[in-house]
Amino acid sequence: MAKYKIPRGTYDILPSESYKWQYVQNTFRKVARLYNFKEIVTPIFESSDLFERSVGDSSDIVEKEMYKFNDKKGRTFALRPEGTASVVRSVVENNLDLDANSTKLYYMGPMFRYDRPQKGRYRQFYQYGVEYFGSDNALIDAQTIALADTFLRQLGLKNYKLEINSIGNATCAKDYDSALINFFKPHFNELCSDCQRRLEKNPKRVLDCKNKTCKSIAKEAPSMLDYLDEECSTHFENLQKYLTQMKIDFVVNPTIVRGLDYYTKTAFEFIDSNLGAQSTLIGGGRYDGLVKQIGGRDVAGIGFAGGFERLLLSLEAEEIKIPNNDKPDVYLVTLGEKAETISAELLMKLRADNISTEFHPDKKTMKAQMKAANRSDARFVILLGDNEIEQNKFNLKNMETGEQELVDFQEMVRIIFQ
Ligand SMILES: [Zn+2]
Ligand SMILES: [Zn+2]
């Protein structure tokens, strides 16, 4: 048995799986580029205060799930539980909102939550996301949603649906909060202790609670949509108009509140019902007050995030085959001492021509080398023995068709690139 074990709730991405990760990450980069988003990379830990202020100290994430630690000088940091707070911190710190070229950002990387591990849910998990700063136009909400939709579609996913909601802004949310408090008060004793504690401070949390009793009471709760003021309801109508215009299907689901404190107006989720309890593929929304709250200018913002783990589960559930481009172009088989000596130079020449090559000098027989060539999944095998060396040629075998040709170096390169 191995002496050391991986920490609970984490996993290794092994070589047999890593091409899948490269594929979904490359696809995300490509789609972000289509919408002219630029990548931003922030540290995996930040002052814990940043998350407490932005995500909200009454949220599950901050209250129960954050990896907090003190460094040697006693400063309190946290491993980032989500991406938006760090991006907003960086935007404010670097004045990025003043630069038209860096108001549309995307990121990818590990996030951390101390949560009970289960299928599709880990303590270190990998997210991708975008943030769009500087506009509160509903067309920008629609564009952000469209980016997420384009991404899922380019991966070939079909069995997902988009649900949208509006949770209003500070003005109308206040009326809604009092309506919620009035609604839940008569049920106070039935609520779980978390909800009892949070009811006055943040009644929307009760709508988010996973407790069965809380859930069934919340079913009858008043809908935010009945409390939207004119500004927020116009914004929500415009969003629906644009989505319809863009032919992106959606349903309005008034129960989406998202688990974070900073959302305003638009909230949305891409749901894959194949995934059971962990059905949210992508979640996002508008956060118009957040930049100011973190010390920046009063700049509007909207974004989304999704987990790569669930995405891969979705691809598996829809039986979408992920192309594996992580294979060598060529496997070099050498026979005899002369060939082995020449191979040192030949391998360099092939790689200089951008041809990915593999070989195993410790395998001496033709049979052992051909076996290894098969296992490597190389598209071509170069057979090099005394005969070939004499003619200054190479025996090139196409592993798909079995075809074999005696060619010179230039011709060989040409065929490999065909
Ligand atoms: Zn409002
Ligand atoms: Zn509860």
Image (cartoon, rainbow, N blue to C red):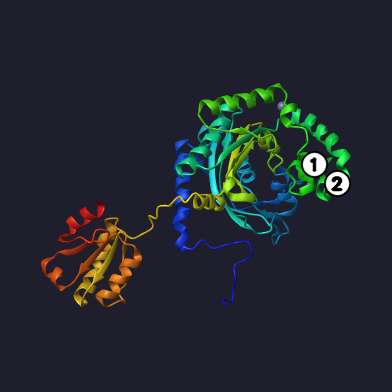
Residue type highlighted by circle 2: Glu
**Which residue lies most toward the left here?**
391
115 to the left or right of 10? right
Q: Quadrant of the image for the N terminus? A: bottom right
Residue located at (45% from left, 39% from top): 33
* Mark 2: few/some/many CA within 10 Å (<14, 14-19, 20+): some
Rendering coords of residue 118 (x, y %): 64, 58
Asked whether 99 or 219 is in front, the reply is 219
User: Where 7 sits versus 213, above or below?
Assistant: below
The spot of residue 120 in percent (x, y) is 60, 55
Q: Amino acid at mark 1?
A: Ile
Question: Does the residue at mark 2 contact the one at mark 1 (Cβ under 8 Å)?
Answer: yes
Q: Position of residue 48 (x, y in %)?
A: 70, 51
Q: Which residue is mark 1?
A: 217
Q: Secondary structure at mark 2?
A: helix
Q: Give the camera-side residue of 295 and 312.
A: 312
Q: Quadrant of residue 350?
A: bottom left
Report the side of 113 relative to 204 (left or right): left
User: Mark 1 packing: few (<14 Cα in 10 Å), some, or many (20+)?
Assistant: some
**Element class at badge 1:** helix
Residue linked to disc 2: 190
The label shown at residue 146 is none
